[in-house]
């Protein structure tokens, strides 16, 4: 089932996972998938390490989900540092397994200053165009409500996003904590003549240090009121419960703002996403 068709039928709710690195992490992921399946998810998405670092592990999870057949997978695919031959090989395996959805991403550049000369793709748009020309799949792209950290300006961020979204089927966003970021993004795209579905990404906070690190990496702001509230919470369980409360409120505000679906970042754990879905009546 293609995400474009699911969105055309009505609101979606979906979950993101990363591919496991160890047997223990594999067992954890399997339990999480089993615990989330009864929520009748629209799709599951599986991340792909920058520069292809999780290539085979991502493929194994995506192909496993496709073969299982109960929840359609969306395979994340980053293109920076990948060759056309590598993309073709992976897409061949996905086609054979019946995978119909790709999240086409630029991917992050090496952080150690290494430059690489395998520059067959530079931006996500290059991958979107390549997939469109060569494969019959539903294509999603990434959107950054608070602007991508490498964008030279808000205007250029929106112009490049509008350009890639025009050629694809839907967008999924980076996480954020204020519904106004989503409203503004959708309005700015509409002003550029783009009204493709933009599914907001919702991150339930489960750990204080981790959320600060992830926000820094992704360009999401942690508002002062949120920093202050987190400082008042002592135990890990208090933080997790607060994360569920906050994500429930944000999700409800997003649905009221007209979001076509909700995509939950799970970090391969099911407890918070299950509680949020139950609070929202999505069970
Ligand atoms: P692009 O669309 O290529 O944009 C990157 C930057 O280049 C932006 O600043 C953009 O404005 C600019 N730009 C675009 N086109 C041009 C142009 N023609 N000229 C000049 N500038 C241009 N990362 C992973 O490694 N693996 C994942 O699985 C993964 N999943 C993600 C899922 C979601 C929903 C989101 C929101 C992000 C995800 N990321 C993932 C992170 C993403 O790969 C990084 O943010 C990456 O730095 C940019 O990806 P992009 O697809 O937005 O890139």
Image (spheres, helix red, strand yellow):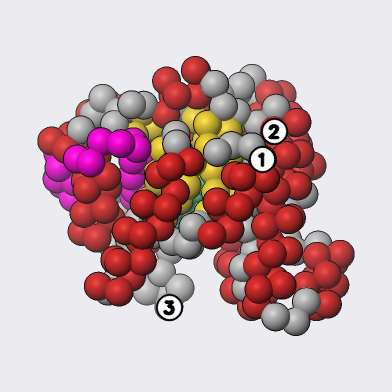
Label 2 – label 3 distance at C-alpha:
40 Å
- Residue carrying label 1: 280
**10 Å crowding of disc 2: few (<14), some (14-19), many (20+):** some
Task: Give the x, y percent position of residue 15.
Answer: 47, 47
Task: Judge whether residue 283 is colored magenta.
Answer: no
Q: Nearer the viewer, residue 65 or 128?
A: 65
**Foreground mark, 1 or 3?**
1
Q: Nearer the viewer, residue 26 or 277?
A: 277
Quarter holding the C terminus?
A: top right
| Horizontal arrangement in the rendering, residue 44 relative to residue 183 (left or right) | left
The answer to whether any part of residue 153 appears in the image is no
Quarter holding the N terminus?
A: top left
Label 2 – label 1 distance at C-alpha:
10 Å
| Horizontal arrangement in the rendering, residue 215 relative to residue 66 (left or right) | right
Task: Give the x, y percent position of residue 16.
Answer: 45, 51
- Residue carrying label 3: 112
The mark that comes first in sequence, 2 or 1, is 2
| Horizontal arrangement in the rendering, residue 37 relative to residue 148 (left or right) | left
């Amino acid at each position: 089932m293609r995400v474009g068709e699911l969105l055309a039928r009505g609101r979606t709710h979906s979950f993101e996972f990363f591919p496991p690195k160890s047997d223990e992490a594999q067992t954890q992921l399997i339990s999480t998938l089993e615990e989330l399946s009864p929520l009748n998810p629209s799709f599951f998405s599986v991340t792909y390490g920058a520069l292809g670092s999780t290539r085979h592990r991502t493929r194994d999870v995506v192909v496993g989900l496709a073969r299982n057949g109960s929840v359609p997978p969306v395979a994340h695919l980053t293109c920076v540092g990948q060759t056309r031959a590598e993309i073709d090989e992976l897409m061949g395996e996905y086609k054979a397994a019946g995978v119909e959805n790709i999240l086409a991403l630029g991917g992050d550049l090496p952080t150690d200053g290494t430059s690489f000369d395998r520059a067959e793709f530079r931006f996500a748009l290059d991958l979107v165009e390549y997939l469109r020309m060569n494969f019959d799949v539903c294509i999603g792209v990434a959107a950054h409500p608070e602007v991508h950290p490498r964008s030279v300006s808000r205007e250029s961020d929106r112009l490049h996003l509008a350009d890639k979204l025009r050629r694809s089927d839907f967008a999924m966003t980076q996480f954020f904590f204020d519904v106004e970021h989503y409203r503004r993004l959708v309005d700015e795209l509409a002003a550029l003549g783009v009204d493709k579905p933009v599914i907001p990404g919702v991150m339930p906070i489960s750990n204080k240090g981790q959320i600060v690190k992830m926000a820094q990496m992704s360009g999401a702001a942690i508002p002062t009121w949120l920093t202050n509230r987190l400082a008042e919470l002592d135990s890990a369980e208090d933080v997790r419960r607060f994360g569920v409360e906050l994500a429930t409120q944000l999700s409800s505000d997003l649905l009221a703002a007209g979001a076509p679906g909700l995509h939950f970042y799970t970090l391969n754990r099911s407890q918070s996403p299950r509680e949020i879905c139950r609070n929202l009546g999505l069970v």
